[in-house]
Amino acid sequence: MKGVWGKVLKVDLTNSICKTETLSDQVYEYFLGGAGLAAYYMWKECPAGTTAFNPANRLTFAGGPMTGLKQTGAAKWTAGAISPSINLNADSAATASFGIEMKEAGFDAIVVHGQASKPVYVVVEDGQAKIKDARKFWKKNAYETEDGIKDAEGNDCEVVTIGQAGERLVRFANIQTHKKSFLGRCGLGAVMGSKMLKGIAVRGAQKCELYDPQEINRLNKEINRRVAELDAAQPELLQFKRVGTAGATELFAPQGNLPIKNYQLARFPSGEKNLHASEYVKKLNARPWPCQYCVMQCHNLCEIKKGPYAYKGKGPEYESFAMVGFNTMVDDIEAVAYACELANMYSMDCISLGVVIAWAMESYEKGVISQRDTYGLDLQWGNAEAMVEMVKKIGERTEGLGYLLGEGCKIAAERLGKGSEDWAVQMKGQEIAAHNWRAQYISALNYCTGVASGPNHERGNSQHIWVAHVRLPEWGIDEVKNEERWSWDKAADRNAKFHDYCNVINSSCHCKFHEFRSYTLTDLVKTINAATGWGWSVEDLRRCGERITTLQKILNIRYGWKKEHDFQYPKRFMEPVHEGPAAGKIPVGLEDAIRDYYRIRGWDEQGQPTPELIQRLGMAEYIEE
Amino acid sequence: MKVQINLKEREFPPGTKFTQVVNLIREANKDEPVMKSLIEKTGQDHITFILNQRIIRPQEYDSIELKDGDDIRWIYPYAGG
């Protein structure tokens, strides 16, 4: 088979053994790579009863057929494992160059299991791997660790690392690479920390054979030109190169899509002004910091030259910006950017972080906790200094509230009680993302039914139908009216298609943001075909997406998912806001929509894949008795 | 004649100008909150129109006559995550 190696590196940290394993073509045809391959290894090697911090948990870092093709957006790669926040299958995607370098090192994936007896890091180079002592890096932040590994192994390697939050098992700890890209959600950094694995370095020079390299070049030229021109044609305040994803605040405010004050409010005038994309460029001195081969260049290098929040590094993405800023009512853009970068260094997901701090602020406001609990901090809404200090307390897992918040707001609320569960905006143990279900009801449906990573906006993305006008015409999503935001008609079908869409993107390893600049399913399938020679249609692509989603569902059932979990949405879902574009909108009918989603998916009333579905997808060997 | 708009085939009479399709799309989206907000703030909706893989500038809209088989894409202004 072309376009992939057919080989993965297996790393056994308990016994300190690294070996190569080959995979059949069928595994790639069924699950592509990336998220699909991570799910495959969980299915193959993590039996029922495996939990997130169990050494048997497989942490898989995987590229896909798009990896290394030099097409804009093809720097994406994925990691997956059983998550410590949702205790189910989870995957998360990152960019920079780690995935490309891993492929050039001769592997489609690195699958880590076991637990080292002391801190280690792994070095992978041109088909070989070594496990090395990482004790000198333990307790260092993720960026210092990357620097240290590069000093030891060479600056030309690509590295993933965790910081203190990962070591100390913060349930929403992430994994970083190149100080600019993060496997953000679902706590994969804590899985890595539980294995005493501090980092992985990869380096290689091998080129994977492609089926039709000339067609790849032709497609790259056409697609790269089209995407670059389209970004340049946007108004300045929406150009990815200028403002990254922070431009979303300009667009989301008129839709009522922002999360404000732990999702209690519709308007935040000083936030909308001070956290605006134009301020991002002015106050943060944003400059493009592109991923390899990308022409859209949505990542930014920012610099605050003086003051208490001085730093130079990654600029916050929309989700980080929204959760750490709007959701906590902190309207100081420098404080928000600095807090996000602190979180990055500790290795914490900014989405969950913003929600847990907002939960703590609401608990403080309601008198459930006091300054005795907050280390003397006045944890009022909008207190930037207190917010920044709480980031440190959580990252350090400081005794008391800092430690508790590192468990996520579900566990924190269960332990604190006093009604605080009512304002824990989470499902299945993971905090809800920065797309407001009141602006489009499909977001509520997505959060409830997502199987790839719990309630994750990026593993469904159906909100993009409205917030970004993304259409999937090849799969039948074309004409959509604005007022359908608040209708359940077609919601289940659209939600299912977007789940499968996210899965093919995250498994082939391409960047979903290119959908905003006209990248289509036709582009994707043509590129996959040119790499592999499979000759797929867009319908074959859909079938593949369905298989990956179905495998993730099988895994979730294995690891303890029950139907009622999809219905345990936050109480706040049914609390309206009283002003703004989404005033009065609450997703009444959500439960029927969930049941409709099961039916559309070919699942039974208990949310389990039916025998007919399994047969249609050719997945009999994957179903559990 | 048959023209594709965002991969969906539509029928138009011969002689249809590009500007007519632009107006149809703008009319269909005029109630969309982001369009309204952008028009209010900047005077434009910032929809980008592409014909046969070439971005068409507003000053060209009136001068282009559509042909059978033309491929029109329109892109909503967006940056976000």
Image (cartoon, coloured by chain):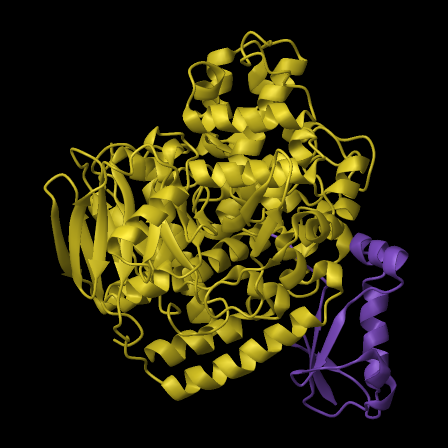
Chain colours: A yellow, B purple
Going by the image, does A132 lie left or right of B14? left
B67 in relation to B30, above or below:
below
Quadrant of image for the N terminus of chain A: bottom left
For the residue pair A229 and A534, the one nearer the viewer reads as: A229
- Work out whether residue A473 can be spotted: yes
For the residue pair B78 and A312, the one nearer the viewer reads as: A312
For the residue pair A87 and A613, the one nearer the viewer reads as: A87
- Work out whether residue B31 can be spotted: no
Q: Residue at image x 31%, y 46%?
A: A148
Going by the image, does A585 lie left or right of A524? right
For the residue pair A562 and A92, the one nearer the viewer reads as: A92
Please give the count of numbered marks on the rendered protein.
0
The location of residue A41, given as percent across then percent down, is 25, 50
Going by the image, does A406 lie left or right of B4? left
**Residue farthest top in this picture:** A372
The location of residue A114, given as percent across then percent down, is 18, 39
Q: Residue at image x 70%, y 41%?
A: A258
The location of residue A65, given as percent across then percent down, is 36, 69
**Residue farthest front in this picture:** A306
Query: Toward which corner of the image does residue A357 lie, by quadrant?
Result: top right
Quadrant of image for the C terminus of chain A: top left
The location of residue A293, given as percent across then percent down, is 47, 70
Q: Residue at image x 79%, y 80%?
A: B57
